[in-house]
Image: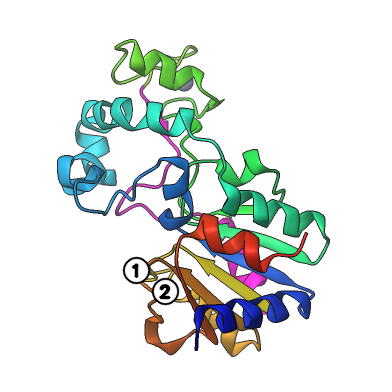
Amino acid sequence: MSQEDALARARNLVASSSRISALTGAGISVGSGIPDFRSEGGVWERYDPLEYATHESFVNDPTKFWTMGREIAPLLLKAKPNDAHIALAQLELGGRFIGIITLNIDNLHQVAGNKNVIELRGNYLRAHCTGCSREYFGEAVHRRVAEGEIPPHCDDCGAVLKSEAVLFGEPLSQSAMSRAIQICRSTDLMLVVGASLQIYPAAYLPSLAKRNGAKVILLNLEGFNRDGVADLVLKGKASDILPKIVEY
Ligand code: ZN
């Protein structure tokens, strides 16, 4: 199928669906200047996740996580939604969109204007105190880290703060998972954008949607169709393609 035919087919699917959803991964934010952590030269090549980003390593030495955080946070803080995020926000405004399940921690869907965003891996702007559970939201914790407070401590009790980005080996939020499953059971068209679908639960959600009768469109740079789950595959940059298939 030519790219033009694939785009036309995608537009038809979007136009004829009434409960559209999206599952988004690192690929949607590359156009906002946030490189995929798993890409060549990416964060995980410079910071071995087993050393810097597992739950166990955080408990043993939170300094390591926040040292990595000091490098990543400025990138996330300056990122703005790109045309792909904006296309999904427009789709929600149109009223035939039931929500986004995202693997990203970058908060860009919310900045773009989407209201129902399920963050399977948390959000880097949220942190909580490991002592008294006080919650923190926003840039302030990252500013303190940037100024050398590593790890950052709670204003109330002095215990170490933990980012709410989900670490490796840490359970996913049960409520986020159950909301994601609810979306998969009720959507009639799932747009899978920039997600590699290699690991659970991302790998499982599109097939769950499909088993419940939804059509699935995969949009990624490589044009892969993981496990044949897609009814249609679009190859290219999310920020180029998504605006073309979403009618405003
Ligand atoms: Zn505290």
Q: Nearer the viewer, residue 3 or 205?
A: 3
Residue 53: % across, % down: 26, 43
When asked about the image quadrant of residue 246, the answer is bottom right
Identity, as a three-letter code, of the amino acid under mark 2: Ala
Can the viewer see residue 116?
no
When asked about the image quadrant of residue 91, the answer is bottom right
When asked about the image quadrant of residue 98, the answer is bottom right
Q: Which mark is residue 199?
A: 1
Q: Are marks 1 and 2 in contact (CB under 8 Å)?
A: yes
Instruction: Give the left or right position of residue 77, taking residue 47 as reference.
Output: right
Residue 84: % across, % down: 58, 54
- Count neighbours of disc 1 (C-alpha within 10 A) and say few if under 14, some if 14 to 19, many if 20 or more: few
Q: Residue at 50% x, 32% y: name it.
A: 125
Identity, as a three-letter code, of the amino acid under mark 1: Ile
Residue 24: % across, % down: 51, 60
Q: Residue at 30% x, 48% y: name it.
A: 37
Mark 1 to mark 2 CA distance (whole Å):
5 Å
Q: Nearer the viewer, residue 196 or 130?
A: 196
Residue 180 located within the stretch drawn in magenta: yes
Can the viewer see residue 139?
yes
- Count neighbours of disc 2 (C-alpha within 10 A) and say few if under 14, some if 14 to 19, many if 20 or more: some
Q: Residue at 30% x, 54% y: name it.
A: 169
Residue 132: % across, % down: 48, 25
Magenta range: 160-185
Q: Which mark is residue 203?
A: 2
